[in-house]
Amino acid sequence: MLHRNTPSSSPSPADPLAGPTALPDRGPRLVPTAPVLASEPEEFPETWEPSPEPNLLQRWFKGWRLVLVLTVLALGYLKWRGGHDYGEFKAWRARGITADAMAAAAAGDPEKAISLFDQAAILAPLDPTVMRRLADFCEPRNDINAIHALRQVIRSGEASPADCERLCRLALDMGHAELAHGPTLQEWGQASPDTLSLTQLRLSAIWLTNRGQYLEGSNRLRQALVKAEGTDQTPPLQIALARLIIDAASSSGMAENAAQEPLQFLTGVAYNPSSPLNLRVEATQLLGGLLLHPARRELLTPLRADLLRTAFTDLAKEIAPADAKRAISYELAASTVECTTYPERRPAIIESVLTKATTADTALPTAGWLNDNQCYQETLDLCAKYHDTGDGFGWFSAKLDALFALKSYDEAEDLLNLKDQPLPAHLQQLLLYRIDLAQGRDETTLDARRKQLEKAAFRAPPEAVFSAAKNLELSGDKLTAYNVYSTLKGHPTAALPARLAMVRCLDGLPDRSAELIKTLESVLQLSPQSDQARNDIVYLLLLDGQPTKDDLITAAQLDKDSPRYLSFRITAALAKLHEEQPAEALALLERDSIPWDRVRPGWQAIYAAALKANGRKEEAQVIAARLNDVPLRPGEKKWLEK
């Protein structure tokens, strides 16, 4: 207790506070007070009373309880609505960035637009507005990302029928049928042609053709042509029908009467000055492929050759002001037609081509043409003259192609090992591997080179990997091609085409059936509508003698749905053989005329097994003799030997 000290003089009795007086103990002071002078009267506060206790609301607001409650409420909100609202915010932000991207594209700045679209796609990969605008940007550029953007719209669950149709159109027209919207195509395929639009008829015809139903596909295109008569849709439909007929024909040749219809359609478009330029280009190129194919040279009469050469020359003149490079390619195509038609003029034609190669821009495409026409030394002469000008990559590639063709492998290897060689790593390793193969290097060296190639492929863009792997595949090295394709099996957009290519490679390796089944199953995971993958799995299981009841039902159903698809028919027949119904198996295989000597050896083996099971042993022996030295799958061999 604190005591106030007063002066030592005697207290006044009139002063009620005189003398030592007890004051309430207020505790130690934090700030010292000034000393009190005797001459100054003191003022004392009123009697102290304790402050009232804070009420409940004050205690909540002042204590930790409020923090806890607010935290719980915030967590509850985040669980209930927070993720949704944050997603909405990201979508709103992505749509704003998309608008900026479209503005950049309209202003002629595609690089900025691409960068902005990347940001928007990362923020909202399933927002329909963002993905539709991305498709709008990519479609005129023939960019496959237009397809992937529309697939994201489908995944969002907000796709309209127009979105589905657009996806099917882009996927089929760009050659990626596996990326189309399967349910929409199936719906069109089962619908009456009278209920479909021209575009739907055309796309369903392509889809049916891809499934082997050539007759149904061509019938739909003919119906579309009737609907389109007198409109600007007629020329593209004529080209589509001509392409279908050419693709359906046997690759070993096309009879004159079978070629008449596509020739008529294509010449009607290619030689008509009123046809749009892009359609004339497409029709003329198709005509060139039809008439210049080695198996169809009898179709290339002097009159047809002259018309085709003139068409290419006219295209070159018309397109030269806008695209000189393409114009040169059409001029060279005209020279190809002339060389093919008049082989005796070949030296003069080559000389004429060389005299036009007066600049680096004209010489480089000429070098490629010379390589295509086996004029390798002339290519090397052009490379020596122009290799320091213009496209270093192009000249380097042209020289390498010529050296490979001339089997000058040591010189090609020295070129590839230069420090400043312009090829990307995967292409450099591919060509070095091809050289090692050609020179017969030991397996240890080849294996090390394969590993280098696969390592480089992991870092290359998907389109570059496809190109390198296709090169290996065409050269017959299917196993290495398979390994290169497999570097893309986990890629977000290239996985499905990569796995389909892996299937193609494994299909040529008879001893890899187990891996093929696994790869086909992975294809079905990515593309559940792939009837071809489903059929191939059943076929392989039948060869191994391990089909289930469902597999047998699938084989019969696929053949019923696509009766003109030989692959499905073979599987259905094999299922009948497995069920010990040889008569039904042979009836399936002889449902219509098939040139059995031109189909796959494994299918010939199944046909021979059906013939033998029906007592036609001599015919079966003819086929077996033809397959003596041909590699077959173990299951195919087993059926052939039964």
Image (spheres, helix red, strand yellow):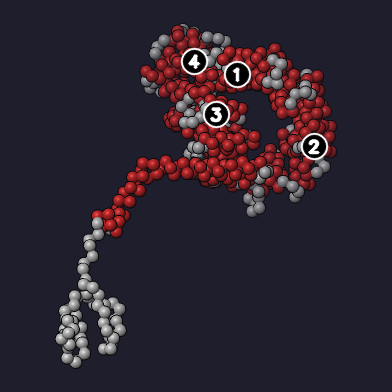
Q: What separation in Å lies between label 2 and label 3 (alpha carbons)?
A: 37 Å
Give, as a three-letter code, the residue at label 1.
Ser
Specify whether 641 is left or right of 360: left
Q: What separation in Å lies between label 2 and label 1 (alpha carbons)?
A: 38 Å
Residue on which disc 2 sits:
321
* Mark 2 or 4, closer to the camera: 2
* Residue 99, picture quadrant: top right
Pointer 3 local density, CA inside 10 Å: few below 14, some 14–19, many at least 20? some
Which quarter of the figure is the N terminus placed in?
A: bottom left
Q: Secondary structure at mark 4?
A: helix
Specify whether 615 is left or right of 438: left
Q: Which mark is residue 347?
A: none
Looking at marks 3 and 4 on the same chain, the residue that comes earlier in the sequence is marked by 3
Tag 3 and tag 1, C-beta contact below 8 Å: no
The residue lying at 50 percent from left, 37 percent from top is 127
* Residue 541, picture quadrant: top left
Say if residue 557 shows up in the picture. Answer: yes
Give, as a three-letter code, the residue at label 4.
Asp
Pointer 4 local density, CA inside 10 Å: few below 14, some 14–19, many at least 20? few
Residue on which disc 4 sits:
561
Residue on which disc 3 sits:
163
Give, as a three-letter code, the residue at label 3.
Asp
Say if residue 374 shows up in the picture. Answer: no
Residue on which disc 1 sits:
197
Compared with residue 34, is residue 247 higher up or lower down, i.e. above or below?
above
Q: What separation in Å lies between label 2 and label 4 (alpha carbons)?
A: 51 Å
